[in-house]
Structure formats: C-alpha cells, structure tokens
Amino acid sequence: MTDSFPWLTVLIFLPLVGAAMLCLFKESAVRPIAFGITIAEFAVAAPLWWLFDSSSASMQFTEQAVWISRPSIQYHVGLDGISLPLVLMTTVLLPLCVLISWRSVETRIKSFMALLLVMEGAMIGVFAALDFVLFYIFWEAMLIPMYLLIGVWGGPNRLYATVKFVLYTLAGSVLLLVAILVLYVQADTFDILRLSSQSYAPTLQFWLFLAFFAAFAVKVPMFPFHTWLPDAHVEAPTAGSVILASVLLKMGTYGFLRFSLPMLPDASKAFTPLMVALSITAIIYGAYMALAQTDLKKLIAYSSVSHMGFVTLGLFTFNLQGIEGAVMQMVNHGITTGGLFLCVGIIYDRTHSRLIADNVGLARPMPRYAACLVIFALSSLGLPGTNSFVGEFLVLAGTFLTNKLAATLASLGIILAAAYLLWMVQRVAFGVPSPVFLPKLHDVNAREAAALIPLVVLVFWIGVFPNPLVSRLHPSVNHVLARALPQPATETEAMRLHDETIGPETPPAPSGGVALARRPNVSDTPPFNGAEGIEPLRKEGRP
Amino acid sequence: MTLSAGDLLLILPEILVVAAACTVLAIEPIMTPHQRDGLAWLSLSTLAVCMGLIASQLGNPAEAFGGFIRVDDYACFWKLLLCLVSGLTVLLSYSYLKEERLRVGEYYAFVLLALAGMMVMVSAEDLLTIYLGTELMSLSLYVMAGLKRAEPRSLEASAKYFVLGAFSSGILLFGISLLYGATGSTRLPAIGAALAGHGLDTPLPLVATILLAAGFGFKLAVVPFHMWTPDVYQGAPTSVTAFMAVASKAASFGAFLRVFVEGLGGLKTDWSFLFLLICIATLVLGNSVALVQTNIKRMLAYSSIAHAGYAMIGVVASGRSPELAGNAIGIASVMLYLAFYAFMTFGAFAVVAMLRKGDVEGDEIEDFTGLAKRHPLAALLMLVFMVSLAGIPPTAGFIGKFYVFMSAVEAGLAWLAVVALIFAVVSAYYYLRVVMVMYMREPETSTAASPRLVLSPAISIVLACAIAGVVILGLYPGPLVNLAVQAVQALQ
C-alpha cells in the first residue's frame, strides 16, 4: 500500500522537533506544550489503525530513501500487524506520562519533557525501522535519554541503578551490532525484509542467534539477565517506569519476533528448549520474587519479569496461537503494567513512600483510585474479561500444543500472579490507613484520572473485544511463522490441533506476502479469530 | 630535477602557512601586547585561504618535485582536516591563553609551523620528506607543550615528550635507512615495486617494517609506545593538548597509512599481524586505565590511546583484505574514524579549556560536579561529546565505529569487532561518569563560590564547529564517506 502522506516520518520526527522546540519556551509553559505535542502525535497515529489493511502481511505506510550510499543504508520505515499495535500503544502512553509528571517532577521540567519526547520518537523509530542500521540507531539512541531520566530525576539509589541499566543494555546491544555487520557481509544488504527472506548456514545462525539473544534477552529481560530491571524501576521517576515497563521491555520481544524467528529459523528451533526453560524460570521465579516484595514498584517490576516470560514462551511455541498470544501479551502488559506504575506514582506523590506497609487502606479515603488499582491488578492476573486474559490464554493454548509440561508450569505462574496481586490489593486497598498519612490521602484529581481512564478503557476494550487487534496481527504472524517453521509437517499438525481446540472459523483471508505463497499449507489455513475462539472456552471457566 | 612554477603552485598552501608563521615571528616583537591579538586573526585568515586552495585541488591529483610530493585526494582529505583543526586551535587558544596569562606571540607561529610539518607528512611520497615533516611537527609541539614555563608539570611534559620523541625519530630514521638498504630507494612507489617484486629474500625489509611501526607507533600513541601520552597531555596547556591529541594524531595516521599501503603493501600479511597485536593491546590498556583516572585530561589521554586502537582495527582489516586500498573499506574507515574523532575530542578539550578560570585549574573530573546547574549549555555539549566518544548513536562517534567494525567483519575478523565492542562498553563507563558528575551530583560548594563561566565568542565558535561536526556527521555522514572512499582510490 502506498500512501502519499509520510505518516511514519511525521510520527518519528514530530516529537524530536517538539523536544527541540521546548527549549524556546519558558519553564512554566513547557507542560501544556509537551502535552499538546504528545496528543498531536496520538492524533497522527490513531488514523493508522483504520487505514491499516488487515488482510495483508506486507509492510504498510512504507517510506524509503537512501541515507548513506556506501554501504547502502536506507531510511526505510513501515508497519505491519505486529508493529502497528506497539506504535499505537506508545503514542497512547506518552500523553499519560506527561500528565503524571505534571506535578511530581519539579526540577528541570524542560529537560525532562524534552527527554520524554526524544524517547517517544526513538521508540516509534525502533518499531517502524525496516533497515537494520536504522533500527540499531534508534535502539541505542534511547539509552542516553533513559540514563538521564533515571539518573537525574530518580530515587536515592539512582546512580547505581542507572549505570547498571546502561552497562547491561549496552553490553547486550554491541553484540547485536556485530551480528548486523556479519549479516550484511553474508547478504550484502541491511534491509530487514530482504535479510528475512534469505537463509543462512546453521553454524552462522547459531552464533547470530546468540548475539541477538544477548541484545534482546537483556532488554526483555529474560532470566538471568533481569537484575537491572528491579533496580531501574525502583529508582526511575513514574514516567520513566511506565516507559521502561510498557515500551522498552517490548523491544526485546519485538526483536525476537522480527529478527530471530524469521532470519534464524533453524537456530531458533534449536534453541527452543533453552528459551522455553528460561521463560518458565522467569515466570515462576518472577512471581515468587514478587510475592516477597514490600516495595510496590519492586513488586510490579518482578511481576513484569514473570509476565514477559509468557511473551517469550509464546514466541517460541512456533504456532499461531502462541505467537499471537505473545504479541497480545506485549500490548496488554504495556497497558496493564503502565496503569499499575501510574497508580504507584499517584500514591507516591501523596505519601512519598512506595512501601506497601505505608500505603494501606486506601479504598475508603481514595475510592476512585482504589477502583483503578483493583482493575489493573485484576487485569494483570489475567481475569477473563480483561485484556491480559486473552494474551495469556492464547500463549498457554499454544504452549499446550507443543509442550504440555511447560504449559502446566506456566499455569503455575498465573496462580502465583493471582496470589501476589490479590495480596497486594488486599493490603493496599483494604485495611486501616495509617493516621500519619490519612490527611494526605485525597482521591485522584481530574489530571490523574485523565491519565488512568484511557488505560482502564483499553483494559476492557481489548478484554471483551480483541478481534480487531487479532485480525490485524493475523497475516503478519502467519508470515513470520511461514519463515520460522522449518518442518511444514509439524505445522499442519499444529494447525489441525489448532482448529480442533479453537472452534469456529471465519472465511479464509487473501494470502499476502511472498513467503506465504511459497508454503501453500500456511496460506490455506484460515485465520484464527480470537474473540470467537475464546468465547466458548471462557464459559467453561479456567483456574 | 628541476623546480617549476607548477610545483610551487601545488604546494602553495604549505608555502602560505610557512609565510604566515614567519610573518608572525617577524612582527610579533614590534607589537604591543594588545595588538598581538591580531596575530590570531592573521593565522585564521591564512588557514581559511589554505582550505579554499586545498579544496580546489580535490579531484586533480598531481606530483611535484619529481614525485617527492603528491597532491592527491588522499593528501587533500587530511590537509583539510588538519587546517580545520589548526584553525580551531587558534580560536581556542585566543581566549585560553589569556586565562593562562600566556601572552606569547610565537604561539601562533608554532601552531602554523607544526601544521606545515603535518601537511608535508600527509602529501610526501618519500620517506625522508615524511621524516622532515614529522620533525617539523614534533619540534614545534615540544616547545608548545612546555609553554607554561612557571609550571613544573608543563616542563616535565615538554622534556618527556622531547626525549621520547627524539628517540622515536631515531628509530624511524633507522627503519628508513634499512629499507633504503633493502630496496635502494626512499621513494614509496619504488619501495613498493621492489618489495612486490621479490618478496622476502632477506629479513631486512621485515626488520625495517618493525622499526617503522615502532617509530610511527610513538607518534600515534599506541601501546606499547604510549607511555609519554598521559603525562604530556596532562602537563601541556589544554589548547596544545587538544592540538596534539587531534592534529598530530591525524597527520601521523595520514603518513603512516601512506607508508604502509604504498610502500610496504607487499608485506601486508606481516604487518597486519603486528598491528593486530598492537591494536588489541591498545584497546585493552587504553580503556582499562582510563577507568581509574580522576583528571579529565589524563582520562582523555587514555581515551585517545584507545581511539587509536579503534582506528587501528581498520588498518588490520585492510591488511587482511585481498585488495589493500581500492574498494576495501578498511583504509577509508580509518580516515573517517580520525575525522570523527577530531571533532569530538577537540570539543571535549574545548569544554575543559573553558572551565579554566582564575585559580581553578578545571581539569579534575570533580571540577565538573554540577556543571549542568552552573552552565547548562556547556554541560549539554560535554554530554554530546562524551556520548559520541563512547560511540553511542546518533553521533559521529557511532558512525566511525560502525565503519571500522564493518571493515573488520568484512575482513573476517568478527571476533576482533566483538573484543573491541566489549571494550567500547567499558569506555562507556568512564565517559558516562563525566555525564553523571555533571548532571547527577550537586556541587559541594555553593554556586556562588565557584567562578562564573562565560562563553567567550572564540570558544563559542570552536564549540559550535565541534558540535556541528559531531551531530551533522552523525546524522548525515554520506558526503564525508564518499570523500574518504574517493581519497583512498588515490593510494597506489
């Protein structure tokens, strides 16, 4: 699809130009202007949802221009069904980040807002880039703004946390750079689509997979590379935590899905046992650690490790449900965890404590706040009817087809999630508030409500009506699968099981993309309709 | 050999620079201290004219003096960079020397003479001419390093630099004489032809190669020939340090590449192994020792050692490629790296020079504490320079690293790229420590107690040039890349 309007260029550069423009204004005017820019950004992004052709797996809204001619590096951007929801999620979250920082950030507000905007441009660039060097530049360009966001506006132990964050991420991503260069020498291109349509020698794939793994696993973060995450989250300002949890972590899993699976299918298959084992470990270990936390932010940070484990688990099932569930889970985790961090930020502004012990019994003085907290907590534990249920259910269904033991162990993570989240809600929402803090506990004001309500709406919207999202995902995920599955036989097997498990079908969508046509048994498979598929099972209930 | 007007026209930039230097020396004694500021403007305008002349020579390769001097795109690339850096040095010194109370008129003459030496180095096709250029450059720099006569550290720097520099010149000369013995010529094309003809019948060329590598190694400040660097960089006046760290390194690389590609190209398998060892040692030592420095000039000295190591990757890679110059990206990546390095390192030193106020030396990393509060613009500029030195996009430093690593991977040295990148992560730690001190620590003394920082117009221009180089070349390196690739074609 060719579109004359440069949607993605506007999306990437509007916040960057906005950040530069902020320098021209007075400190007092910065907040509304930054908010205006993020809203304008959302207004540009929103039409893409409807303009997107959900029957096609090819990249849409593409723009291509030569950036450096020797070697050929292109400014090549585009969106498919996988990156579109992530870009939209980013543009939804950024206005909320500006709102939540309105009063809680007092010092150097101009720099703070400028950095938030730079982050937004770079994050959208990462999801939209179709040239590997361009991707890498956006990927790395986020490092320094994030370093400053945590290091300048963070908590008392911020220096340690921020250095740990930077060194961990940098160490992972430099190996990615070498991998990109090795791929270039092999294929003589940096174009992601062209790189994805070639095949590489198994030994080379092995090493490349490890290099990709170093970059992406640190970012996800997968066990045992997760230790930077609790530190960074605890010290980061609220908006920093939201961006970190909701968007930055998704880049790791996005990387696995966009690069590891389609470019290195053989190695991905070979590493599946390891990836599944690490995912299961992350799910259970993260949940156990969350149970033991007394600090709200740390609790949510460990719950992120656990929930991201579901995403990596889903990706390495190599079937439609698993991968679609993983992408859904990426979006849902962004919404739900973003909401939870906003909630923590709101209470921190009042009591200046993140400890569960200090923030008890909020339901009576702050009923609206408590309602939001409960909604996000229930969504996070995967209650049917909320967004996370859809993703986690699909991941588990997909895992069950390939590895019953892993599915069983992963379900354990859901039970633990229910335990630590409900326990947290029980303590924070109910009980008797401490008299010291009671005078400060006024309910959410209009600004804070405006930051929470969009996410509450999304929680239920995706939870009840996931079909629009799933239908946009479908062709793109199929496209990845067609590349990633080395054995068409197992594919058909998985599809047969898929049909039996999931039930009613919709008519086949027209197949898109070269790779789909190459493997007819994939394009013949009718698309999985998420909402209809889940409905009958939901009635039966689940643990 | 006859002298023709055409020959003189070709070296007109060099002639102009030397003439300006002589003029400065001649008129400086009869000027009042106030009038001496005019010497800076004389130097600057000369350099501007030279850059115009050199730019007009691009694309028209020609030989002068029977092939002793070659004015090709390769030479022009380096000369443009060197003239630019010298101009920035003059501007930086203009206000820095006042702060240091170093009102020396000869200063500008030394900058110009050193530049003349460097320009000869990069366009000479003859080993002895290269040697002469090297000596002209070094002798000027020895004096400049010791300009803070009242300060023992500066004198120590000068003496140390002189002794070790003279020693290295001796080694270089010894290598040249051995090579003359082996091949019967000091001309690079003739040496190249002789060595390509009958390979290694005698060990003589190999010994000469090692001696030349050692001689150039001192000038490039690569391990194990780096010992002088930290002391000299710390002791010399900051503007001189910036000049040495950038211009002298660039010129040495310019001559070094020409000698090893044109003259010793036949021995490339041998020297690429030698430089591989030097490269790894330089990366490891430069980056590790920089970690523990508390003085920023010393830290930048070790960082400049480490950066020579990164540039060396391109040299090693080009030695491993079937095609030495031509289309291989190796040599071009070294040239690009040095160009990017020039902007970011010069910028960093300019910020250090800016902090020199009254009694405050301003070269300890602690002196940067809370700079973001005291002077937000200076802190922001330093942030960009540090990020670029660490090689994080979207800055020029990243593009430079990108090209050297690409040359390494193309030459089948992916493991070397991995090693170098791991040390790039190490380097991020010490560069970002400066950022941390500036942005995340509160000044211990009250803001009123520390001297007020004002940007003088001259330093503003320097910083503007440096930041423009770092940012614009980081975002749009295409034209410079093409220029470097075109320049490499000129190497025979």
Image (cartoon, coloured by chain):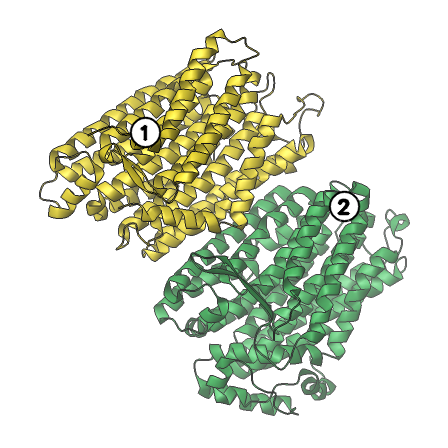
Location of residue B302 in the rendering, given as x and y in whole percent from the top left corner = 43, 34
Report the chain shown in yellow: B
User: Which residue carries the number 2 mark?
Assistant: A105
Q: Confirm whether residue A163 shows in the render.
A: yes
Label annotation for residue B351 = none
* In the depicted structure, whether residue A442 falls above or below residue B233: below
Residue B341 shown left or right of residue A338 in the figure? left
On the rendered image, what quadrant is the N terminus of chain A found in?
A: bottom right
Front-most of B107 and B74?
B74
Apparent colour of chain A:
green
User: Which residue carries the number 1 mark?
Assistant: B8
Dot 2: element = loop
Dot 1: element = helix
Quarter where residue B57 is shown = top left
Location of residue A27 in the rendering, given as x and y in whole percent from the top left corner = 78, 41
* In the depicted structure, whether residue B194 falls above or below residue A378: above
| Identity, as a three-letter code, of the amino acid under mark 1 | Leu
Residue A380 shown left or right of residue A286 in the figure? right
Depth check, mark 1 against mark 2: the one in front is 1
How crowded is the residue under tag 1: few (<14 C-alpha within 10 Å), some, or many (20+)?
some
Residue B246 shown left or right of residue A109 in the figure? left
Q: Confirm whether residue B145 shows in the render.
A: no
On the rendered image, what quadrant is the C terminus of chain A found in?
A: bottom right
Location of residue B13 in the rendering, given as x and y in whole percent from the top left corner = 39, 30
Subunit bearing disc 2:
A
Quarter where residue A409 is shown = bottom right
* In the depicted structure, whether residue B299 falls above or below residue A199: above
Residue farthest to the front?
B5
Q: How many marks?
A: 2
